[in-house]
Image (tube, rainbow, N blue to C red):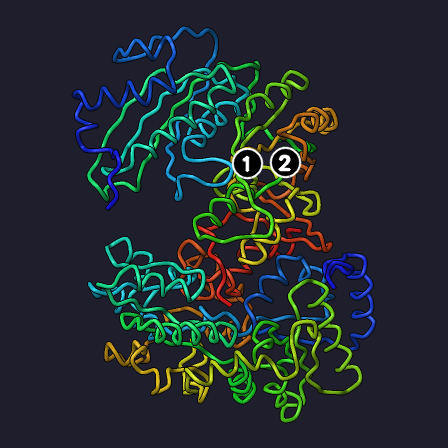
Amino acid sequence: MEKFFSFKDPVLGRKLLQKLEQDLEAPLRFMEVCGTHTVALFQSGLRSLLPEGLEHLSGPGCPVCVTSSGEMALCLELAQKDDVIVATFGDMLRVPGPDGLNLKEAKALGARVEVCYAPFDALAVARRHPEARVVFLGVGFETTAPAVAATIQQAEALQLYNFSVLSFHKLVPPALRHLLSTGKTAVDGFLLPGHVSTVIGVRPYAFLADEFQLPAVISGFDPLDMLMGLAMMVRQRREHRAAVENQYARAVKKQGNRKALNVMEEVFTVQDAEWRGLGRIPQSGFGLSDRYAVFDALNIFGLQARHMPEPKGCACGQVLQGLIRPDACPLFQKQCTPAHPVGPCMVSTEGSCAAYFQYQLCPGQS
Amino acid sequence: MKHEARVLLDHGSGGRASLRLIQNIFLSCFGNSILDSLDDAAVLEIEGRLAMSTDTFTVDPPFFPGGDIGSLAVHGTSNDVSMLGAEPLYLSCAFVLEEGLPLATLEAVVASMGRSLKETSLRIVTGDTKVVPKGAVDKLFINTTGIGRLLVENPPRGRRAEAGDAILISGTVGDHGLAVLSKREGMQFDSPIISDSAMLHPLVLSLLQAVPDINVLRDPTRGGLATTLNEIAQQSAQEFVIREEAIPIQGAVAEGCSFLGLDPLYLANEGKFLCILPQSKARQALDVLQAHPLGRSAQCIGEVRSGHPGRVVLQTEFGGERFLRMLEGEQMPRIC
């Protein structure tokens, strides 16, 4: 399809923007909950083109950003064990733990940390190092979780019992429900994550429209996808409708990906999880099921996730809930920069603070 | 473990083993009248103003599509000398070798350096070899220092970009960075991605002969195009405006980057340069670049304007505007 139609076409983009502006009857405020959307909105320049009456916020959509201080402390604790190799996605290296130390520094001090591009890479590390215990840091949403689940099944098939997973996977729909239930986050609609939805499908979001009467649109990541998603929400508002619509139908099936859902259900069990900035959310994370307990790092190393305070002065929690914009945090661009991140929203390239820092032209400078 | 000839600590002892290494490997590939004298230092005769640059090369993996650590060590340093509008003439070359490195690897790297030198009159005139215990370095590190003679009165400098200047790039960006990364991670793409590692002097020479008044020349190596643009904007205290749609990127590189969540504007290049010069000369410069095999895809990608000093603004393909900032640390593939 993309051979015949470009989802980056600026001419179509201008037309859609005009349509969106016409439909915009009153100021609206939308939120996206996907780090890839956060970055794509900036990178494509679409953010700079949105009409004044349309405010767009970044919610808790970056997996690194919502990894709690207590969870990070466990990652660092494991990395400091002599016989442990921590295998992780690169984004986790710079997240500071409660005392400021991050995995990159721990590595410089001698900890064994291997960066993986895919969870399966961690199995190769485990095979190369039979003398060590290899722990994969399972961070991510429903998009990453199936690949990690499949990796665990593969480890079992290969009898790689020096491999385990520290599972901090988190689930998107419960976080959305939590945001709305607290009553603090005021939004007029959600731009829903395309990647996560390829796995879970459309139905898990139904409560947004049914219970909270909010428009929501699953959208892809090219500029026209996102613009179309926003325009569809503006239209719902104008027509006083609330529905979950699927703009990204070329990738997202209504019922999701059954195969991926099956492997997740087999390996993981849904449990409460601690989210940075949002606190403990019931039934919002994945732990390993009893059947796979031999691959559960929490179980193997006798660890327990603890609640740890957030860094002092850091407003990541408020940013993640859409209560303030990144540049309203007193630390933004002062004590907190990508070189010296205080909070995780500045660490991950998909964090909203890092994206603001990297791309946002300051008002009055353009 | 397979038996094969390997680098041993003996090879760095300064004794007979060292001499064998020098004669059998280095002199056979680099040999020239200055180096062959094997004195403690080289005697050089150069007139005029000189440009000098040094660089140390470490790359994992040492061999990748389109080049290797040896070709990089020759191209990288001589290109830095060329960027000052100078003709690179002499190189020094120092190796740090890891004990146990197969001699065949060293031979292949040195042979590649020899081939890269053949492209010009550049010569390696002095060198050194150290061998360190296994694990103290990763396979081999190479340092090269280059000296060249300035070809123009007023050499191009990072601080010389002026409002109204045009910004040209000599070809596609991101090729080298993605070639090395995909080789290292064992990733396959539909069409192979090949490093652009090349000696830029011949292209720079034709450019300077046709258009001597160039304000800035710089090769966007580590940190890529975006980082280099920021460096120059800061040194010149000017604002740059870049048009995204004009930046040449190979289709396979764009697709590979999109798949991995990487931005090609931050990936290293080893055979490209930025050229900033008065707008009135831009057309002529582009014609010269595009007529040369190394500059076929050259494009004008933006302009210098007086505005917010040190800022680089990207006008996106979609029609918006955003910062194009330097990157903090390395680019990391995304978690989804």
Q: Is residue B123 left or right of residue B284?
A: left
Q: Position of residue A297 (x, y in %)?
A: 30, 76
Q: Quadrant of residue B152?
A: top right
Residue under label 1: B196
Residue beneath the point at 28% across and 32% down = B96
- Mark 2 is on which residue type? Gly
Circle nearer the viewer, 2 or 1: 1
Q: Does residue B170 lie above or below B241 as drawn? A: above
Per the image, label 1 sits on a secondary structure element best described as: loop
- Could you say which is closer to the camera, residue A332 or residue B331? B331
> Could you tell whether B134 is left or right of B199 in the image?
left
SS category of the residue bearing label 2: loop
Q: Which residue is mark 2?
A: B171
B132 shown above or below A272: above
Query: Is the residue at mark 2 from the same chain as the one at mark 1?
Result: yes
Residue closer to the observer: A312 or A133? A133
Q: Which label belongs to residue B163?
A: none
Label 2 close to label 1 by CB (< 8 Å): yes
Check disc 1: other Cα within 10 Å, few if <14, some if 14-19, many if 20+.
many
- Image-based side of A129 in relation to B335, left or right: left
Counting labels gives 2
Determine the residue located farthest toward the front in the rendered image. Answer: B3
Question: Residue at 22% across / 42% down in the picture?
Answer: B134
What is the chain identity of the residue bearing mark 1? Answer: B
